[in-house]
Amino acid sequence: MKTDYNTISVVLADRQFLIAEALQALLAPRCKKFGTVSTKAGLLQQLEKESISLLITDDALFDFAALSELGDLKKKYPATAIVVLTNAINSMKIKELHDVGIRNIILKTDDRDELFQAIEAALKGKKYYSGEVLDTLLKKDSPSEEISVLTPSEVEIVRQIASGLSTKEIAAKKHISFHTVMTHRKNIFRKLGVSSSPELLMYAIKAGLIDNIEYHI
């Protein structure tokens, strides 16, 4: 049985302007209500204020301190289905999302049909991973294999972050600009599908790139 979109309200929690515009164009004409929020405080206010059928979010680009916060939202608002729509993913991140109860994941590179299939499944309480997400999951990749996508310079920056150096200190030590270090950090996060420095470093520990003793955050 197809979902009657005229009866559902959707909230998008994402800071990417073009994604918000695209989803608004796709979903707003179909849904009873479609809204966007750019902060966690705004999202919590929306969830408290009214019954939300579906939350679409990119946790990597939102101000969740940890994935556990997304899991907490799922527990607190069980009637609200959650779809994670993200730029990149790896098998470790899929497992972490699964562990907090998030089992509807698609990529921003997926097509329109994948989006609507994910929404249909989420609203019915069923699991849905897009084709690309399933491919990532079935690769059974290990952290040590995934870490190989980093350049030697990026690996060095991960180790310097682990040693407790700030972005400014890393820039001075490598004789490059602050902006260049920030660009490296963003690329590292994107390649590994992580969303915070602690998450990055735990990933690096599991990959054997650094030892627990080096972990300073």
Image (cartoon, rainbow, N blue to C red):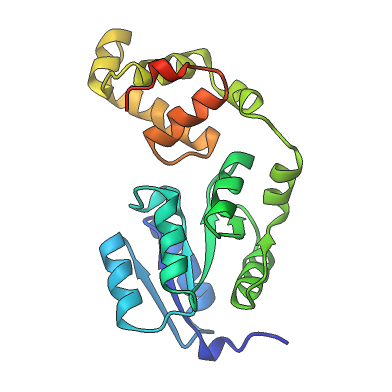
The answer to whether 176 appears left or right of 147 in the picture is left
Above or below — where is 115 with respect to 209?
below
Quadrant for the N terminus, please. Answer: bottom right
Question: How many numbered tags mark residues here?
Answer: 0
Identity of the residue drawn at 55% across and 60% down: 101
Above or below — where is 214 with respect to 15?
above
Residue 141, position in %: x, y? Answer: 70, 33
The answer to whether 192 appears left or right of 15 in the picture is right
Residue 40 visible to the viewer: yes
Residue 188 visible to the viewer: no
Quadrant for the C terminus, please. Answer: top left
Identity of the residue drawn at 37% across and 20% down: 162
Which of the 4 image quadrants contains residue 173?
top left
Residue 123, position in %: x, y? Answer: 59, 77
The answer to whether 159 appears left or right of 121 in the picture is left
Residue 15, position in %: x, y? Answer: 36, 56
Identity of the residue drawn at 68% across and 63% down: 128
